[in-house]
Image (spheres, grey):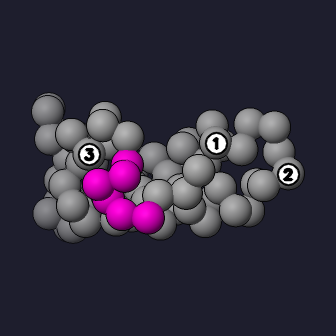
Amino acid sequence: MPYRTNADLPAPVRGHLPPHAQDIYREAFNHAYAAHAREKAQETIAHRIAWAAVKRSYVRMSDRWVPRTAFG
């Protein structure tokens, strides 16, 4: 199911990602969910795509996620 706001995201996402990363996750998830509507594993696929989108812009440093731009 698509997420309307970041507050609707699963607890593990809300609890680990900063707000901008949550925005990325939510937008990627919603797009992937719609794009894979006919597939049996629609939700699983959408979650994987959403995490991949976050990992393009953020990196996990020990227990927190930081923007990749901080390293460039």
Question: In which image quadrant can residue 71 be found?
Answer: bottom left
Pointer 2 or 1: first along the chain: 2
Q: Compare residues 63 and 4 and report the one nearer the observer.
A: 4
Residue at the location (70% across, 62% down)?
34
Q: Quadrant of the C terminus?
A: bottom left
Magenta span includes 29: no
Q: Compare residues 29 and 53 and report the one nearer the observer.
A: 29
The image shows residue 22 at horizontal and vertical percentages of: 31, 57
Under mark 3, the amino acid is Arg
The image shows residue 63 at horizontal and vertical percentages of: 14, 33
Under mark 2, the amino acid is Arg
The image shows residue 5 at horizontal and vertical percentages of: 36, 63
Pointer 1 or 3: first along the chain: 3
SS for tag 1? Answer: helix
Q: Is residue 36 visible?
A: yes
Residue at the spot of label 2: 38
- Residue 43: mark: 1
Q: Which residues are magenta?
A: 4-9
Q: Residues within 10 Å of mark 3 (few under 14, many from 20)?
A: some
Residue at the spot of label 3: 14
Question: In which image quadrant can residue 36 be found?
Answer: bottom right
Residue at the location (21% across, 61% down)?
19
Q: CA distance from mark 2 to mark 1?
A: 11 Å
Q: Marks 2 and 1: CB-CB under 8 Å?
A: no
